[in-house]
Image (tube, rainbow, N blue to C red):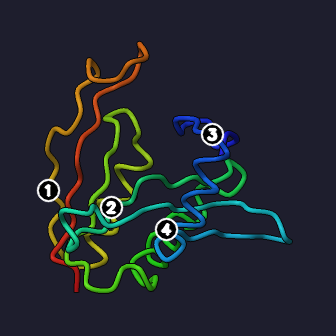
Amino acid sequence: MKESNVLDLNSSYLYLLLAKDFAETCVVAELSGKIVGFVTGYHPPARPEVLFLWQIGILPSMQGCGLGKRLVTSFLHSPGAQGATLLETTVAPSNAASRALFLAIARQLGVECRISPCFSASQFPESGHEDEELYRIGPLP
């Protein structure tokens, strides 16, 4: 969702693949027939107990009204989330909204949120990308 102004841009083909192959771990929010937010994720093949949230995108006009929390909650209750004991995602240190969102999700669930380094800026091929920290939330109830 280019309009979010914070997500790494990916091809429409990638989003079609996610919607096709990972539909059980993707959630879309619509308002008047227009997509206003989404969550995409998957189970890493070697770690089926983990539900990895790859991207969350919300239109700027819909930010700040609790939609992110509702999307993540729906993601955790999606058919593809069954059996998951950990929620993982990565967040750039400057992304205060996402940091606050995932800390709030952990508080809401009454579980720990452990933050550790994941990818360094030097691992990204394009210049200007920040480090990404891994957020591990769980154990999920």
Mark 2 → mark 4, Cα distance in angstroms: 12 Å
- Kind of residue at disc 3: Ser
Q: Name the residue that disc number 2 marks.
A: 52
Mark 2 → mark 3, Cα distance in angstroms: 20 Å
Q: Position of residue 126 (x, y in %)?
A: 43, 17
Left or right of 2 in this view: 50: left
Q: Nearer the viewer, mark 2 or mark 3?
A: 3
Per the rendering, the mark at residue 22 is: 4
Q: Position of residue 21 (x, y in %)?
A: 52, 66
Give yes or no for contact between labels 4 and 1 (Cβ–Cβ under 8 Å).
no
Query: 136 and 107: which one is in front?
Result: 136
| Quadrant placement of the C terminus | bottom left
If you read the primary sequence from the N terminus, does the residue marked by circle 2 or circle 3 appear first?
3
- Kind of residue at disc 1: Arg
Per the rendering, the mark at residue 58 is: none
Q: Name the residue that disc number 1 marks.
A: 114
Q: Name the residue that disc number 3 marks.
A: 11
